[in-house]
Amino acid sequence: MSETSVTNILMAGVGGQGTLLASEILSEVLMLAGHDVKKAEVHGMAQRGGSVVSHVRFGSRVFSPTIPEGEADILFGFELLETCRYLALVKPTGTVVVNNLRIAPPSVALGQNSYPDDIPAKLRQHVADVRLIDGLQLAEQAGNPRTVNTVLLGALANTLSPSHEQWLTAMRKLVPPRFLDVNLRAFELGRAVDKR
Amino acid sequence: MSRTVLSGNEAFARAAYEAGVRVASAYPGTPSTEILENIVQYERIDASWAPNEKVSVEVGIGASMGGARTMVTMKHVGVNVAADPLFTFSYTGVRGGFVLVVADDPEMHSSQNEQDSRNYARFAKVPMFEPADSQEALDLTRLAFEVSERFDTPVMVRSTTRLSHSKTVVSLGEPLADLPPTNLERDPAKFVMLPGNARVRHPVIEKTLEEMAEWASDQPFNRIESGSGELGIITAGVAYQYAREVFPEAHILKLGLVHPLPKRLIREFAARCKTVYVVEELDPVIEEQVRAMGIEVVGKEKVPLCGELSPGRLRRAFGLESIEPAPATEALPPRPPNMCPGCPHRGVFYALNRLKAFVTGDIGCYTLGFMPPLSAMDTCICMGASIGNATGLAKVVPEQEQHKVVGVIGDSTFLHTGINGLIDMVYNASKATVIILDNSTTGMTGRQDHPGTGYTLQGGQAYQVDLEALCRSVGVRHVVTVDPYQIDETRTIIEQAMQAPEVAVVITRRPCVLIKHDVLEKRPPLFIDAGKCTGCKACLKLGCPAIEWQADANATGKGIARVDRLLCTGCGICEQVCKFAAFGVCDE
């Protein structure tokens, strides 16, 4: 019941990147591994290409569906700028698993602002364990650029306790059958990239 | 019993199934929309989209009068539309159990206000449950049907964004096997609310609520969780989760029923605590009633009145240590939501911007026409308001400004509550202009069908309302339809409508690029010829996410625009605004 038994994963990305399917698989696998799980996110207005964030919490018993500020153990980022935006919410002793991808926000696309330089270095100033993943390259290698979210899940899986078989069970349940094979390949490529 | 992870909305749908609901009706509205979308999987439930929330409640009342258990769902502001039938339905009571699930949106993640629906429960004299997670969303909603029939009253269940859109672990129950028979059964003293009958019913429901308050003091959904200190907290809904997280030692009175309050239980709880806090999101609904009982509590003088709660906000409210978010090292460029690449609304707002129209807006994806660089929306109040607002403005502004007033409204919103405003416009001889942005779906809430799309909730064929004929039938003579991908023609037609000396309606028709039905033609993406682009930035004024400015990109070191071919849908409106023929179509 104590608060310290809860692990917090904050996911950040851009609407349309497939963060929802990833957070669904993540919640499922954590439940399969026997944890109490809560996941919170916002639909609607926030999805139209805007900044999106999901909170996933697991442990023996989870109360709040949202992560208390500054208590995220893992920041799981699908895009560099959005990961940087939520950096303050992660513990300095935590881990950042981040997709090495830049998507220009409107003011940058309009030439009114520039995309911040060298975000990986900024991430490393705050958190020591930063894992940069070339998601798009690996997804293309898997056979479909739209599997970036699964590549990233594979990399995230290396930081979590559920077994490989539990991950595969969750994916078989939630990924549409015609996309399952390519997603399983993408997951394996994500897992292989960053075993430490 | 099988365990699964369900969102609050999935759990509400499951509750309808387990409770033996026969009829479900709703109009989409974030964060409530997915309840009906999930009910579709249970084939024994007759589920349908209504054109608005008032109709959905009236359909639900009819089904209840016929003896069926019925669920109606909506977002908080939908209750404003549905309030009229609801306030009298509490007088008549039910035949089949009736549950209205209303989803509030503290923090206004996707809403124009953050009204607290618990006030409606008190105002309409309808009991209200408030679950705190998906398991309770299932259990309390299922129970709400029994309570509805036992106490002969409609019952509301309050959700919030954090309940509806959070997933938690749930153990499923068994569905009722036998549904009660339905038939026509006359009971005029109960269901005909003429003054003479209503005068008889009013004291009945007041007495019922008193009885329920007494009954509720002994029910397990209102429970005391004993702690170890002298502090007690009265709380309900998702706020309970935050209270447990922040005050692990406190005694907690966790309310599952937030109207009527279990007064006896509250007195017992307060008597065993030295200090009592009330932790509730939005209005001091519980706090004021507990104070009126003569019990001293700490509430909104500390807990924020505006916005949603969080563990951090609650800690800071009570001066507890909270990890302060480290300050950002620099201001990061924001990433607000935007119209999609290929959105058919983009060209319309581009034209309105150029025409310097004063645009009364409405509720939908197109409200994003407010954002720069399109910057072509001047008002936004509620569903359907664009048309009435335009009428009122045109009545009072100087004659030379009247023609600038243009109301814009989506197809789904027009059929929701826009048509009434158009009838008024014609009846009272307004000269304002209305644009119906017909993208053949209810876009913002996730692309639901409506009476103008030709499809039902289940995707079956339905009669498709003819918007042109509808406008003409209420007396609009100037009705013109245009393809918003043709931006010069769109601008000319809007300009002509604005100059017309009578009510004019322009229908801009082109399906949403994310539409679920297979109606879109696939178009190859565009590219920009770096040799032809002069860097004039005209295309950037469209605000298309697929066009990005590249500083220092061409041979002379000058900036040019670039198209992201993965995002581009090939709509071609950028090509039409380019004076230098710099755009080309990719070979696919």
Image (tube, coloured by chain):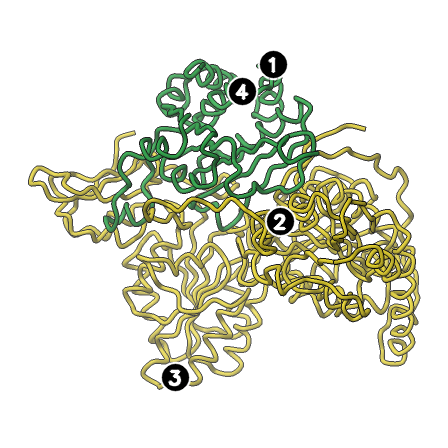
Chain colours: A green, B yellow
Q: Residue at x 66, y 43 (%)?
A: B245
Secondary structure, mark 1, is helix
Q: Position of residue A24 (x, y in %)?
A: 58, 31
Identify the residue under disc 3.
Answer: B397
The chain under label 1 reads: A
User: Which badge, 1 or 4, is on the more N-terminal residue?
Assistant: 1
Secondary structure, mark 4, is helix
The amino acid at mark 1 is Glu
Residue B192's disc number: none
Identify the residue under disc 2.
Answer: B33
Identify the residue under disc 4.
Answer: A180
The amino acid at mark 3 is Val
Q: Are marks 3 and 1 in contact (CB under 8 Å)?
A: no
Q: Are marks 2 and 3 in contact (CB under 8 Å)?
A: no
The amino acid at mark 2 is Thr
User: Which badge, 2 or 3, is on the more N-terminal residue?
Assistant: 2
Residue A165's disc number: 1
Whole-Å distance between the Cαs marked 2 and 3? 39 Å
Whole-Å distance between the Cαs marked 2 and 4? 28 Å
The chain under label 3 reads: B
Q: Quadrant of the N terminus of chain A?
A: top right
Task: Please give left or right for residue B576 compared with residue B401 in the image.
Answer: left
Tell me: residue A177, above or below residue B187. above
Tell me: residue B289, above or below residue B174. below
Whole-Å distance between the Cαs marked 1 and 2? 34 Å
Q: Is residue B72 visible?
A: no
Whole-Å distance between the Cαs marked 3 and 4? 61 Å
Between marks 1 and 4 in the image, the one whose residue lies nearer the viewer: 1
